[in-house]
Amino acid sequence: MNTKGATTSSAGGTDGASDSSSAAKRNSKKPKYSRFTQQELPACKPILTPGWVITTFIFVGVIFIPIGLASLFASERVVEIVYRYDEGCIPTNYSDQKLAYIQNSTTNKTCTRSLIVPKQMKRPVYVYYQLDNFYQNHRRYVKSRSDKQLRSRASESDTSTCDPEGTTPDNSPIVPCGLIAWSLFNDTYGFLVNNKTLKVSKRNIAWKSDQEHKFGSDVYPKNFQSGGLIGGAKLNASIPLSEQADLIVWMRTAAFPTFRKLYGKIEKDLEANENVTVVIQNNYNTYSFGGKKKLVLSTTSWIGGKNDFLGVAYLTVGGLCLFLAISFILVYVVKPRPLGDPSFLSWNRNPSGV
Amino acid sequence: MTSGEPLLSSSSRASNLSSVVHPPPLTLNIGSFNCLCPNASFSSSVFDDAQHNFFDLNDEDFVSVRDSSFCKRSLERSASLVTTKEFHSADSQFFQQFLLECPVQERKRMVSWGGAMELHNSSATFEISGASTRVQEKLNKSQRSHRKSHQFEDNLLHEENARLIYISDPKRTNDKYEFTGNEIRTSKYTLITFLPKNLFIQFHRVAYLYFLAIAALNQLPPLAVFGRTVSLFPLLFVLCVTAVKDGYEDWRRHRSDRKENNREALVLHSGQFQLKKWKKIQAGEVVKICADEAIPCDMVLLGTSDPSGIAYIQTMNLDGESNLKTRYARQETTSAVLEGDSILGLIRCEQPNRNIYEFTANMEFKGQKISLSQSNIILRGCQLKNTEWVIGVVVYAGQETKAMLNSAESPSKRSRLEGYMNRETLWLSIFLLGMCLVVAIGMGLWLERHKDQLDTLAYYRKIYFTNGRDNGKTYKYYGIAMETFFSFLSSIIVFQIMIPISLYITMELVRLGQSYFMIGDKHMYDSSTDSRFQCRSLNINEDLGQIRYVFSDKTGTLTENKMEFQRASVYGKSYGSSVLMADPLQESNIAEATAAAVGGRKWKLKSEIAVDSELMSLLHRDLVGDERIAAHEFFLTLAACNTVIPILTHSPSSCCTESQRHEDVEAIDYQGESPDEQALVSAASAYGYTLFERTSGHIVIDVNGEKQRFDVLGLHEFDSVRKRMSVVIRYPDNAVKVLVKGADTSMFSILAKDIERDDHTRHATQAHLTEYSSQGLRTLVVAARDLTDAELEEWQCKYEDASTSLTDRSLKLRQTAALIECNLNLLGATGIEDKLQVGVPETIESLRQAGIKVWVLTGDKQETAISIGLSCKLLTADMQQIIINGNSEDECRNLLADAKAKYGVKSLNCRNQNLEWKKNDEIDYLEIPADKKPSNLPQWHAGKDEGMMSPSLALIIDGNSLVYILEKDLESELFNLATSCRVVLCCRVAPLQKAGIVDLIKCRTDDMTLAIGDGANDVSMIQMADVGVGICGQEGRQAVMASDFAMGQFRFLERLLLVHGHWNYQRVGYLVLYNFYRNAVFVLMLFWYILCTAFSATSALTDWSSVFYSVIYTSVPTIVVGILDKDLSHKTLIQYPKLYGAGYRHESYNMQLFWMTMIDTLWQSLVLFYIPLYTYKESSIDIWSMGSLWTIAVVVLVNIHLAMDIQRWVLITHIAVWGSIIITCACMVVLDSIPIFPNYWTIYHLAKSPTYWLTILLIIIVALLPRFLIKVIHQIFWPSDIQIAREADILRKRPDYLGLKPDRGSS
C-alpha cells in the first residue's frame, strides 16, 4: 500500500515537473491525499476471536451473578405488608351495592383492621396505597392538567388543557384544574400500635423538585371539587399547592395501571409480630371500574421495594453466560477453525463451484 | 422528456411548409403520423435527429418538385414512416428496440419497393443520423454548405414563424419581437421565488408529503397526540436542511452565472467596436471575437480574418470533440467586411431549437438572397481558434442559444437496493397498519366493555359535569365507532416512524459521503488526463456492488483510441515489424537516423513516432523504380488524402539535444475528425512527408525538407457506402493523380486487374492485411492512379455539377467518385494500432474472477474485435468460439439452434455462407478478404459438445444477426445461449443495438448491468444500463454527460466495482436494515406500552424525545457508519475478486435478513418493554420516569447494537456512537430541567437510583444476547467468505489486534 502510494505520488510529481509551470500544478484536479480521504485512518477492526467471545461471556457472567445475588439479598431484606381492603371494607349489608355505598356521602366509611408485622420493620416504614386497574396513564387523563397553572398564580386561568374540569360554570378557573387533580385519592389511613397512634409523616413524600419548582407556593386551591361530580379529595384552600403533598404525589401520574403511591412515612420501627391497627377511611371510588385498593407498608433497600425480578434475572443471565462460555470453550476445543485461513474460502473449499 | 417539444415543433413546421409547397397528401400523412405517435414525449434525441434528417431529405425533394414521380415517392416515404410509427406505438415500451430496428426495416421496405437508389440513400442517412452525430455533421456539411437555390427556404422564412434579425440594428431587431437578452440564468431561484419554489419542489417527494400528512393529522384536536409545534419539527428540520443545501447550490450557480454574464466582448457600436458585457449583448448586434476567445452567443459569421472566410472553432464544451471545426463566412459578406463596408441586411432564421447540427436561415444582403446553413454559424460555448478574428451577427442570445437549450440533465436512475427497500417498506406499512388496527380494535372493545362506566370513571370522562351551560355535553367523545377510528389515526401518528422516512434522507447523505471518498480515491485519479473520478449520479452508489454484467465499448474504452501507426505494407513488402520488437537501444538508433535523415526540417511533431529504418532508407533513395515510386505515392496519399488540419504552434522550448540545431522549432499538431487520419498524417510526417498547410484549394507538403504545393482539385469524402476516400491533386509538375484510401473490401474490387505484376503485390498485401488484422490492427488499403486529361475533364465537369447540385448531391458525388475510383494501382496497406489501455487485461481478468460477465460491444468488425478480445484476455485460446452472423432470420435461427445443440459444430458452414454474403453486401469499413481468415479464428471440435455449460465458451455475434434476433422471437434463444457463454463479443453493432443488448439482459434477468463507454455512440447503452460509466477519453464528453460515473481509465473499473462497489453495497445494505430495526424497535416498544394504557395511544416518552429519537439521538452514527465503515481492506478485495460475489448474491440485504432483523427487533422490543415492567411492577414509578428509562435504554440499545456490527472503528465512529448516547443524556437532562414540562427533574431522581442503571444494563445484555450468540455461532460454524478474508486481513496485518478491541456491550 505504502509503496504503491509513493509511486503514484512520485509519478504525479514528475507530471507536474514536466508541465514545468506551477499554474498547471495548481489547476490540477488531482485529489488531495490524506489518510482520511483514502479511508486509511488508523482504526481498530474488532473480530470475534474465540478468546474474545469467551472472555465476553465470562465477563458478563462474572459481573451479573454478584449483582443478581446482591439484589436478591436486598429484596429479601425488604419487609412488606400488603392488605387489600376494597372488598373487605364494604359493610356486609352493602356488599351487593358497593357503588351505592361509596357514592353515598352519608354512609360511614370508616373501617378498622389489624395487621400483624411479620418481621421487624426498620424505620422509616413507608405507607403506600396501591390501586389496580386504574389507568392513570390513559391519554385523556395524562393530558388533563395545566402545569402552568400549578406553577404560578399568574397563569391561574390557563386551563385550556384541563377540560372537562377546567372552569366552573361562571368561567372562573378551577385550581388545580384537570381530571388528574379532580380524581385525587381520598382514602385516609390511621395507624395504632398498642392503642398508641403512630404518626404518619407526610414530609418528603413528594419530590422536592416538584414542591419547590413545579407547584407554586402562591397558588391556592380555588373552586376545587365544586362541580356536579365529586371525583375525590377536597383540598384545604388555605394551604398553597406546594404544601399539598398528597396532591403532588398524585399528580405524578403512574406508568402502569397497577401502581402504588406514597401515602406517608412512619418514622418508627415496627417490631415483629406487632399488631398494627389500621383505621381506613374508605372514601375513594374504585368500585365503578372494579379497581382494587390495597394498603402497603414496606421498608426499603438500595434496590427499592420488594421485587425479586432483578435479582433472578441477573442470576439467570449471568448463569446463562457462564454456560455459554463453557460451551464455546468446548466448541473451540473440539472443532477449532483456524481464523483467516484462506483454504476455508468457499471457492477454495469446492473449487469446481463458480 | 424535453425533446418532446422540439419534436412537435419540427413536425408542425413540416406541415406548415408542406402546406405551402406541397400537394396535400404529404400533409395528411404527416398529420396522421403525429396522431399515431401520441406518446411523442418518449422521443430520445436520436429519434429527434432522425426526424430532422427526414426533413432534410424532404427539403431536397421539395426542390425537385418537377419530378413527376415525386408525389408517389414522398407518399411512400411518409407511409413507411407511418407504418413504423404504428409499429412503434404498438410496442412503445420497447422504443429503444424499435429505433434500433427502424433503420433496417426502413431500408428493407424501400428496397423491396424497388425504389430508386436515392431511396436507399435516404435510409442510409437515417441510419447514420441515429448512429453518430459526427457523421451526421459531416453529412450536413456536405449537403448544406454549398446550397445555392433558396426556393424552399424562402418559403419557409417568409412565414410568420421566422425570426428576423436586422444586422447591426439591434433596436429594430428587438423592437418587434421579444428576444431574450444574452443574460443566462442557470440558477433555479431568485431571492423572492426561493421559498415558494423550493418548497414546491421539495414537496414533490413522497416522503415529505408523508411528513406533512402526519403533521396535519396531528393538528386535528381529537388526534393531537403530540404537541402541535413538536409534530412539525421533523418536517421543518428536513425542509430547512434541504433548503439550505439547495440554496447553497443555487448561490454557486448564481455566482458562476454572474461571472459568465459579466464577461466582455467587442460589439459594434456606431461604427466602432467597443467592449460590452455579455449580458448586454442583444440579437442583431455585430460582435467581433478574437483568437482564443469564447463565443458569447450564437452568431452568423459575417467575416473573418481569412480572406476566404474560414474560421476554426473548438466545440469542446458543446459536443466534447476536441478537434477544430471549420466554419465559413459567406463570401459576399466577407469581402464586404474586408473592404470595411458596414453591413446592413436582414437574416431570417428558424426559431431557437436545441439541435446543434442544424441551422436554417437566409440573409438579404445588398439585394441578394444568400442562404445560410449550419456551417455559417458559430455557437455559444465554443472557442475561436487559429483565426485572428471573426465578425458575426448575433442571432440567438442567452437562454435561446443552442448551448443553453441543450443543457438538460440526464434522467436519474434509482438504485436496485432502494427498490427492494421499498418492498420491505411495504411490509413495514403492513405492520404499521396491523398495529394501528390492534390499537383501534382494542380501543373499541374497551369502550364497549366500559360503556356504562364511562361517565364515572376517574380517568375517562366523556361528559361535562359542571353545572353550567356545558353540563351534559360530551367532551371529546364522538361515539364508539368514531373513537375507534380516531384511535386508529392517532396511533398512526404515534407509530409514524415505523415507515423510515428519515432513511431516505440518511441514504442521500450517506451516498454523498461515499461519493466524496470515491472521488477522492487516489487510485482512481488519472494523471494522464488529469481527471479524477466523477460521481454524476448520487442515487446508485450501492448498485456498483451488485453488477453481474459489464457491457463495454471497445474503442476508447478498452483501447486508448490513440491510433498509432504500426505497420505498413508498401508494394507488397511489410514494414514495421522490427519496430514492434525493437529494444530501446535500437529505437534510439532509429530515432537518430531519422533525425539525421530529416535534418532539414524545422518543425517537430507533438508526438514522436518510431519509424522503420528499412522503409526510411527506401524513402531516401532516388525517385526511381516502381517500389520507390510506390512508396512515395503511398506516403503522399497518407499525407494528402484526409481532412486533417495542421496547426502550427511556436513552441518556446525545445529538446536539449535538438536545441542547438534549431532555434525556431515549430510544433505541428494535427487536428482531424478521425484519429485514424491523424495517425496516418503523423506517420507520413515521421517518414518525411509532413503535411504543412491545408486550405480548401491546395495543400503544402514538406517532402524530405522540400516544400511542395499540391492543388486539390476535388475531394470525395468518406462515406459508409463507398467506404473509401479519394482526393484529386495536381502535382507541382502538373500531373494529376487521384489518391485513394479505404477499407480493403471496397478497395480490392476497384483495383486495376489487368496488370500482371500487380498480382504478386496484391496477394502479398492481402496476406499482410490478414496478419495486421489478426494482431488487432485497423487496416486501410492505399491506392492511386494517374488521371488523363480527358478523364480529368470529364470528372471535373461532373464534379462541378455534383458539388453545386441541390438535389441528390451525395448520390451525384458518389457517381462522380466512381468515375475516377477505378483501375487503381495498389500501393500498399497500413496497420494502425489502437493501443490497449493500461491494465485492461488484468482488469478484465479480475472482473471475471469476481463473477462479472464482461460483454464487449463494438462497432468494429469481427476479426478486429476477436483480436482485441484475445489481446485483452477476454478470449483465451482454449475457449470455444460460437460465431453467429446470419443475414436472415432463418439463418440466425438455425445458427442459434445449432449452437445451442452442438456448440459450434456447424458453424464453419454457416460462416462460409456469411462470408459470401458479406462480400456482396459490403458493409464493413475495414474488411479483410474472405479467404484469408486469421489463423487464430475458431477451431471447432465437433465431438466436444458436452462442454456446453463449461466456462470456456465464447459467443461472437454481429450486428446484422442482432437485427434479426432482437427483432424476432429469437431473443430468448440468444439470451439462453449468451448467458451460458463466458464471454460475449458483439461486433459491428449500432449504438441503439448496444442499448438493445443491455435491455435484453435487463428484461430477462434480475442481474445488474453496467455499461461503460466513451463515445457518443455509447450514450444509449449507458443510459439503458442500470449503471452507466463514462470514460473521459478522446471522443468527447457525451458519454460522460450521460453517465452516472465517469473516470479516466477502464482499469479503474476494477477498483470502482470490487472495492468501492463492495464497500458501498455492504454499507448501504446494513444501513437500510439497521434503520428498519432502529425505528421498528422504538415503535414496537411504544406499541407494547399502549396495550397497557387502555389502548389510548399514550406515549411514556416525552413528545420531544419521540421526535428527537430518529433525528438527533440515533441518526449520526448510522450516517457515519454508512460512510466510513468497511469490512475489508481494498488490498484484500483486489486480491480476492470473488468476494465481490456477496454483492450480486444479495448477501447484505435480502428478504431473509429482513425477517431475521424483524424477529430480532421483536425480541429486543419485548425486552425493552417487559424488563422495566417487571422491575417496576407494583412500584410508585411514574410515567415520565418510565419514559426516561425507555428513552435512554432504547438509544443505548440501538447504538450498542450498531457498535456490535461496526467493522472498523475510527475516531469519528467513536465520537458518533458514544457521542450520540451522551447527547441523548444531555437532551434528557435539558428537557427535564424545564419546570413547565410535567417531566420536570425526572432524570435527576432516576440517576440516583441503582435500579435504574441495573435495569438498563439488563435490557442491553438480554436484548443483544441472542443477536450476539447467533453472530458468534454463525461465524464459528458457517463463516462467510468475507468473514474469513477479514480475519486473514486483520490477523496478518496486526497481530496485536487483541489490545485494540473495543469493549462491546459488556458495560
Image: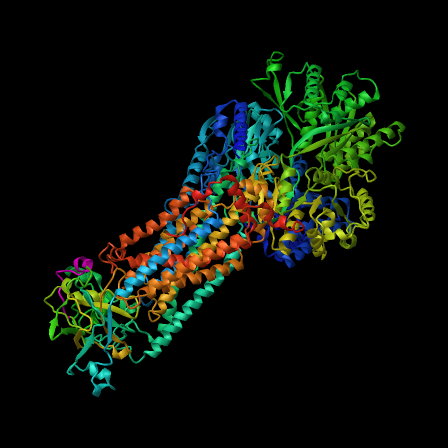
Question: In this view of the protein, can residue B704 be seen by the observer?
Answer: yes
In the rendered view, how is the structure colored? rainbow
Dividing the picture into quarters, in which one does residue B864 lie?
top right
Give coordinates of residue B1020: x percent, y percent. Answer: 61, 46
On screen, residue B484 above or below B406: below
Q: Is residue B223 left or right of residue A263?
A: right
- In front: B17, or B1237? B1237
Question: Which residue: 45% across, 48% down?
Answer: B1206
- In front: B953, or B199? B953
Give coordinates of residue A310: x percent, y percent. Answer: 33, 62
Give coordinates of residue A281: x percent, y percent. Answer: 17, 77
On screen, residue B26 above or below B1175: above
- In front: B1153, or B49? B1153
Dividing the picture into quarters, in which one does residue B326 lie?
top right
Give coordinates of residue B343: x percent, y percent. Answer: 54, 29
B511 drawn magenta? no
The segment highlighted magenta reads A208-223
